[in-house]
């Protein structure tokens, strides 16, 4: 073949080959990080969720605090599933509301804390990416207005753009692999564990807790007055959807370490409680406040229960103290 | 429209200047070109800056007046094509260039797409003669051009954009860090980011031009290997620094009016060069800082000061480190527009405060591992080029198999290593 033609055609062929190599690799790549993998597993779980189940949803507090293995021992002919995802916020739960209602659960238990409504840290927009093109993900008019341009872009991304977007996880994965060789602590992560998915096994040292308690940015995250109005509104809409579907909904104010609640202003906690009480009256759901039953020794850190706290919570649920199982 | 006005005006003014015999009239027509070009640039780029200065002065003098800033959109590439147009009329005025015979050719020179938006600032005397040659497909040009385009893309998309993840987060609030080392890393990160970003664009522009058979001179020549600031400016944004030297510094008087005036001309040239980058105080200060460094270096040469002579062979490396220390301090001024952040960062940069150094480095490494890996990789590659000059000539002159492997690796790295978040070229804003 003419030398000039080869030089001209070769780059085009190389571009096609590299594109195919990339697309082939990325279509089989499934490592998106612990949180995203967990979220994907939760989305997949909806396909096989039995009717009449007790479903727990929320962020890492629910993941750490709820042991379905302990709860199931007292359930009659129904199963318990802990579908919590670390850092998830109402705008990311709302699109799966129709998946939730379609499973016709016995009850939906939503664990919340002021952090659940704070957008500063919990902004894993990639969760929208994983909802893209998923069966059962519905965006109603309210959500269409509430979601940001970036969130909608991820939610409705086209296949080729999706393939390109996925590359952000490739580098992270390989870096994570490298780091895992030097890391001393191995977290107990299994995205498909819906029964007892806690991952924290050690209590944080007092010095670290002190550091957090003295950090105004950390404390600010738990102040309902600094919460995102958008998230508060979306949560209200989410409850409205569940209420319209005549589902039994229990909203649980998850316990916070007393060290933290003592640091937070009384009026902040009062506003938080008032907000949930108002919603409870409006949408007729059960509101539980677990705060007073837990001491600082029940926690691994400022928000998550340790094994002692987890058992105490499960015992209270099983023994009917909180009327979750009826 | 603005571009069209600029093209038509300078094309005909160039013709008139060349045809006019009377020196005073030639000067008059040249001044018209100067005022018109700089006027357009000033209106679109500096109006709000002047309004802010007036308002600031008014507040200090308690005059009570305050003008609202205007909603002016900066035309893309105006800083670049204005300097190209000016160099055209200036060269004709100085009788170094004959006017272009065809308006189309002149328009082609100004609007030639690879360099229109962000340079390099091409001279008419280098570009226009090339249009007279017949354009044909030359395999060597195609190979060299594509080699350069691919490398430019890798520099921009893989290096600059990955480093930008750290730089953008870091400079959002540098006061979060208490020690000097994070500030130095921020300066290093931005210095490498802006180099990869801008030289990457220049490589793409030069490569595309070469594919089309047009030769454009290199715009960057390993600036971070410079042994003094003067050398740095001979290696950094060469098309701008030579433009400033030929049309501003020499026109002001260069080194013809004594040493003191030379230093002053250097300062003026660099202050205006700084302002060319953007209408903001930090660019003005950055320009003044660069002028000061150049003047200080010139002074040390004039006085034959060489404090490090006793170091022998190690001296070269120490010169390199000291030069880059001052260059990267300059990048802090360039990057940070908020006065409190800038003063904080400069103080930290020069005081070598090692408070919490290991804890802060650990936080930075954990949060921005990827960016740091690309910073380290860039430093290794930059040093590697000391031993391998003309690397693109070597790659493009390889037989097709090895050249194909280079393209293959470049394409793969673009697919796999580019971050999801795209960043526009930094110099697009200028």
Image: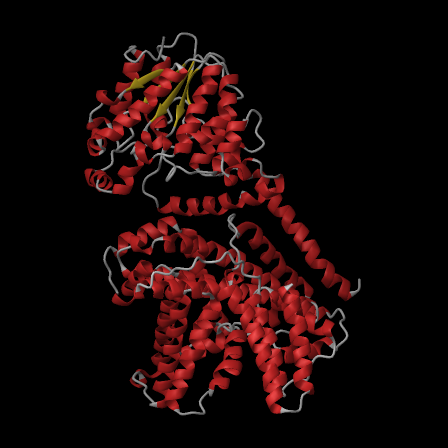
Q: Quadrant of the N terminus of chain A?
A: bottom right
Front residue of this view, candidates A296 and B383:
A296
In the shown orientation, is residue A120 left or right of residue B387?
A: left
Q: Is residue B264 above or below residue B135?
A: below
Front residue of B26/B184: it is B26
Quadrant in the rendering for residue B150: bottom right
Q: Which quadrant is the C terminus of chain A positioned in? A: top left
Residue B62 % position (x, y): 30, 63
Horizontal side, residue B66 vs residue B156: left or right: left
The total number of labels drawn is: 0
Residue in front for this viewpoint, B143 or A182: B143
Picture quadrant of residue A122: top left
Whether residue A119 can be seen here: yes
- What residue is drawn where x is 53% and y is 37%? A152
What x and y, as percent, mark residue A159? 62, 39
Q: Position of residue B406 (x, y in %)?
A: 61, 61
Q: Residue at x 52, y 26 (%)?
A: A44
Q: Residue furthest right?
A: A1
């Amino acid at each position: 073949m003419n030398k000039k033609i080869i030089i001209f055609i070769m780059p085009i062929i190389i571009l096609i080959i590299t594109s195919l190599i990339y697309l082939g690799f990325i279509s089989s790549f499934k490592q998106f990080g612990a949180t995203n993998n967990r979220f994907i597993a939760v989305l997949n779980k909806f396909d096989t969720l039995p009717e009449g189940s007790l479903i727990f949803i929320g962020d890492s507090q629910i993941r750490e605090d709820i042991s379905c293995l302990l709860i199931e021992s007292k359930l009659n002919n129904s199963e318990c599933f802990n579908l919590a995802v670390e850092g998830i916020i109402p705008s990311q739960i709302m699109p799966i509301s129709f998946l939730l209602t379609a499973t016709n659960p016995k009850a939906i238990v939503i664990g919340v804390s002021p952090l659940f409504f704070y957008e500063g840290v919990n902004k894993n927009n990639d969760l929208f990416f994983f909802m893209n093109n998923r069966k059962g993900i519905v965006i109603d008019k309210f959500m269409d207005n509430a979601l940001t341009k970036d969130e909608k872009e991820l939610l409705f991304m086209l296949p080729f753009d999706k393939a390109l977007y996925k590359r952000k996880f490739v580098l992270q994965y390989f870096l994570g692999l490298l780091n895992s060789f030097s890391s001393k602590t191995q977290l107990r992560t299994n995205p498909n564990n819906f029964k007892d998915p806690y991952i924290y096994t050690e209590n944080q040292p007092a010095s670290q807790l002190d550091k957090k308690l003295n950090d105004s940015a950390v404390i600010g995250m738990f102040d309902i007055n600094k919460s995102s109005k958008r998230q508060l509104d979306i949560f209200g809409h989410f409850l409205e959807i569940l209420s319209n579907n005549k589902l039994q909904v229990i909203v649980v104010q998850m316990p916070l370490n007393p060290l933290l609640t003592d640091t937070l202003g009384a009026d902040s906690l009062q506003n938080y409680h008032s907000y949930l009480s108002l919603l409870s009256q409006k949408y007729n759901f059960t509101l539980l406040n677990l705060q007073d039953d837990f001491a600082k020794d029940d926690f691994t850190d400022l928000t998550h229960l340790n094994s002692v706290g987890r058992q105490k919570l499960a015992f209270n649920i099983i023994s009917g103290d909180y009327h979750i199982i009826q | 429209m603005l571009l069209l006005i600029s093209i038509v005006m300078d094309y005909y003014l160039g013709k008139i200047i060349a045809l006019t015999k009377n020196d005073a009239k030639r000067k008059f027509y040249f001044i018209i070109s100067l005022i018109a070009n700089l006027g357009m640039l000033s209106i679109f780029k500096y109006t709000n800056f002047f309004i802010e200065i007036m308002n600031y002065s008014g507040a200090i003098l308690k005059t009570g007046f305050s003008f609202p800033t205007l909603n002016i959109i900066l035309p893309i590439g105006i800083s670049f094509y204005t300097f190209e147009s000016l160099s055209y009329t200036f060269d004709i005025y100085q009788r170094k260039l004959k006017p272009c015979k065809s308006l189309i050719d002149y328009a082609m020179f100004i609007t030639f797409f690879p360099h229109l938006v962000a340079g390099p600032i091409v001279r008419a005397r280098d570009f226009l003669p090339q249009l007279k040659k017949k354009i044909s497909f030359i395999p060597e040009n195609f190979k060299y051009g594509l080699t350069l385009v691919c490398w430019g893309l890798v520099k921009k998309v893989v290096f600059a954009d990955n480093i930008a993840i750290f730089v953008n987060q870091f400079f959002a609030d540098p006061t979060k860090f208490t020690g000097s080392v994070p500030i130095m890393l921020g300066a290093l990160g931005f210095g490498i980011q802006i180099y990869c970003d801008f030289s990457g664009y220049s490589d793409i522009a030069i490569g595309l031009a070469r594919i089309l058979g047009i030769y454009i001179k290199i715009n960057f020549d390993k600036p971070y290997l410079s042994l003094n600031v003067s050398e740095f400016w001979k290696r950094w944004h060469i098309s701008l620094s030579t433009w400033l030297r030929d049309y501003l510094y020499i026109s002001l008087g260069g080194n013809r009016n004594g040493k003191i005036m030379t230093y002053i001309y250097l300062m003026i040239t660099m202050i205006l060069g700084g302002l060319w980058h953007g209408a903001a105080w930090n660019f003005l200060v950055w320009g003044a800082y660069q002028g000061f460094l150049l003047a200080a270096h010139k002074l040390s040469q004039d006085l034959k000061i060489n404090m490090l002579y006793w170091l022998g062979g190690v001296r070269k490396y120490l010169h390199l480190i000291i030069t880059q220390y001052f260059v990267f301090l300059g990048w802090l001024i360039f990057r940070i527009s908020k006065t409190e952040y800038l003063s904080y960062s400069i103080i930290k940069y020069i005081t070598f405060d090692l408070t919490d150094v290991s804890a802060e480095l650990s936080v930075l490494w954990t949060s921005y591992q990827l960016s740091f890996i690309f910073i380290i990789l860039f430093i290794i590659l930059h040093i590697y080029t000391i031993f391998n000059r003309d690397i693109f000539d070597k790659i493009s002159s390889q037989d097709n198999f090895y050249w194909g492997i280079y393209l293959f690796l470049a394409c793969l790295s673009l697919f796999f290593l580019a971050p999801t978040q795209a960043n526009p070229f930094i110099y697009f804003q200028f």
